[in-house]
Amino acid sequence: MRLSQLFTKTLREAPADETAKNAQFLIRGGFVFKNSAGIYSFLPLGWRVMQKIANIVREEMDALGGQEMFMPALVEKKYMEPTGRWSLDVGYFAKPKNEKESEFVLGWSHEEVLTSIAAKYISSYKDLSFSAYQIQTKFRHEARAKSGLLRGREFMMKDLYSFHASEDDLNKYYEKAAEAYHKVFERCGLKAIYTIAAGGVFTDKFTHEFQVVSDIGEDIIYLCDKCEYAENKEIAKLKDGDMCPKCSGKISEEKSIEVGNIFNNGTKYSEALGLNFTDEKGDKHPVVMGAYGIGISRLMATIVEIHNDGVGIIWPENVAPYKVHLISLDQNEEAGKIYNDLSKSGVEVLYDDREDKTAGEKFADADLIGCPIRIVVSKKTLEKDSVELKHRNEKYFKLIKLTEVLNAMQ
Amino acid sequence: MRLSQLFTKTLREAPADETAKNAQFLIRGGFVFKNSAGIYSFLPLGWRVMQKIANIVREEMDALGGQEMFMPALVEKKYMEPTGRWSLDVGYFAKPKNEKESEFVLGWSHEEVLTSIAAKYISSYKDLSFSAYQIQTKFRHEARAKSGLLRGREFMMKDLYSFHASEDDLNKYYEKAAEAYHKVFERCGLKAIYTIAAGGVFTDKFTHEFQVVSDIGEDIIYLCDKCEYAENKEIAKLKDGDMCPKCSGKISEEKSIEVGNIFNNGTKYSEALGLNFTDEKGDKHPVVMGAYGIGISRLMATIVEIHNDGVGIIWPENVAPYKVHLISLDQNEEAGKIYNDLSKSGVEVLYDDREDKTAGEKFADADLIGCPIRIVVSKKTLEKDSVELKHRNEKYFKLIKLTEVLNAMQ
């Protein structure tokens, strides 16, 4: 992509009410646009990052046997009433202008919808187990939408649901899902702590969260420095300085970001909505269910919170909008050639071909946007048949011969 | 994908209120699930088709220079009031349980949002032209949601918007967009007629629609049998049997499906929302805009309306959920081997490995689901070291040697 053609521009300042680093960098870099409190548009650079994160999640969910689908945002009353969640003040209720009562809530979670769909197809133990997921916009009415994209009113989420004939079978899947989640976060450049927590409006049982330690997080966890055992403050009886209940390590209190969660929902939804199966003996039982969420846009925000320096984002390569940020100075022809060659070889390049920007402005934009590799082509470098190559997370550049640029991308 | 693992099943009957063929076949085949009137879930098979259509659209929009992005569904009052579209009874209004007034309409079109975003970045003629698009759920309050997925209350749409310094420049882009649209429909196996029409709630100018002639369509067009000149009845002064105003051909009246539309919006939105640019002389002008829509879910429904026979769908290969529907009879091992070999070679295969279904049931499901190629492996075919290969749109099968199956996929 040529920067001269990208319709967004970097901005010197983010809106005054955006205090979170993730929102500041993402807005200033042209990744997102703030439409309303807690509501953002994903601009071309930001949408590329979102798609990369979504594809990592998709690959790991597919590997877990998840079948991708897509459920509606307009969730009718008939789905939410049987579980008692229609009356909750969590979502947005939707209606046409001239109707009195709302018959729809904007989906803030889809347990009820998928349970009802499954009831159409599942009748025997032979139909179990299975899991299905979607990557879709969710809506939650946050009184104070804050923390930038960490807590949106409208946000992108992956929600997977699993269906089992027994609690044992669910538990096995639950463990596999936890492993898949660790893979997702690792591929996104994050270290996530597996944490015991409460179930909120989803389940009465204990659940597990994946927590990334960061000052901006809204959660407090108690974390062992040795075995990484962790409890969410909601349920923890631990306090700072305690000895770990699992090993001899020391517990510390950390503010933290919840990037994913997994729930054993038991038969709460299947009983309320009549999702039953017949076992080998002909006896009827409610299906045992699990739910597994990852906030895709929250993940993007978390990556920015963790991977930045004072001047901009430092994207991990797997989720970077482009691998290379190519800067042309002195209007040389060689940069365009490198752009074409790299692009043809499948290397994703953001090419700063703008003629009305100074070198300083171009360098600042590259630091703000945060692609992993910066290449500078100028008269000075071309005198040595070379380019300057610098990694975003390193301090110094090195000279690379023009003939070696493609090899340096490996 | 193994059919034994797919959580959906084919159904003998669609809901009684679904009279449209597209909904009947899509529901019975396990492509979609009807959640509410005009509101559907896309099940794994249907979601694959949607993604294939979306990717065709994406490729053609990218080739047109469109920059992909993603705007919110919750569109705040401040965007829609300046254009007078806040007061329209087109969309769903959304609010939390305990708030009195709705401040949001669910996006039914995004001219205002993108115009406002563009106003942040565009100031000079040098910033023009550009175009941006999204593939996203749209919400429209249809009094009678009918015609199955042809007219949903919640549906998937691609909307592209273009921004220009002059009407001339817009016109050139408009022509290119029309060509790109023809490519999209052709790749989806549809013949679309370029038709002059009225602008509805979008613009006061004439617009162009892409119409696919079909009895189920809600539009009436007047179409020349010779030069394919067409007018929508809304604006047409023509009647059945008239002579074509462009050539000597004969005009006939056709019921028709609008699968896409393109609009010259002029400066309607840029004037209302303050999107201006400065020209080379330093004078200020409102930006000239175009809008270009394709209903992705409507396109899926249209393909089904056009490509079906009495017993099921006949997917064009580009948008088929899988290329091959592989049927194993008599529980042989060879079918599993073919499934693995084809999958490894990148051929998409839906493998009917179910052990509790008769040959008749399996053939009926293959016809209903409608993958382009059916392969049957049975004791009988294996006696001849062969499989039966039949194209969905042909009547007879042929025997293919086991060693030649992969070659037959070309």
Image: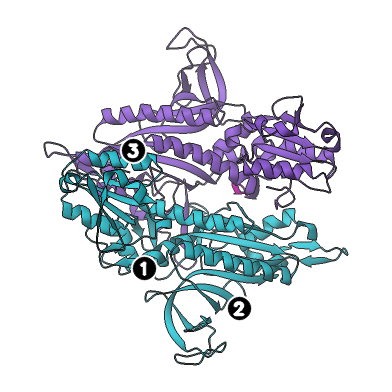
Chain colours: A purple, B cyan
Q: Chain of mark 1?
A: B
Q: Residues within 10 Å of mark 3 (few under 14, many from 20)?
A: many
How far apart, in angstroms, are the residues tagged by discs 3 and 2?
51 Å
Residue at numbered disc 2? B206
| Residue at 43% from the left image edge and 59% from the top image edge | A102
Residue A166 spot, x, y in % from top left: 24, 32
Q: Does residue B242 appear anywhere in the picture? A: yes
Q: Chain of mark 2?
A: B
Q: Chain of mark 3?
A: A
Q: Nearer the viewer, residue A165 or B233?
A: B233
Q: Which residues are magenta?
A: A36-43
Disc 1 marks which amino acid?
Glu
Q: Is residue A197 above or below residue B157?
A: above
Q: Nearer the viewer, residue A402 or A335?
A: A402
Q: Secondary structure at mark 2?
A: loop
Residue at numbered disc 1? B305
Q: Is residue B231 above or below residue A228?
A: below
Residue at numbered disc 3? A162
Disc 2 marks which amino acid?
Phe
Q: Secondary structure at mark 3?
A: strand
- Residue A63 occupies which quadrant of the picture? top left
How far apart, in angstroms, are the residues tagged by discs 2 and 1?
28 Å
Which circle's residue, 2 or 1, is located before the other in the chain?
A: 2
**Left or right: B348, with B335 as reference point:** right
How far apart, in angstroms, are the residues tagged by discs 3 and 1?
34 Å
Q: Residue furthest left?
A: A281
Disc ID at residue A392: none
Q: Main secondary structure of the magenta part?
A: strand
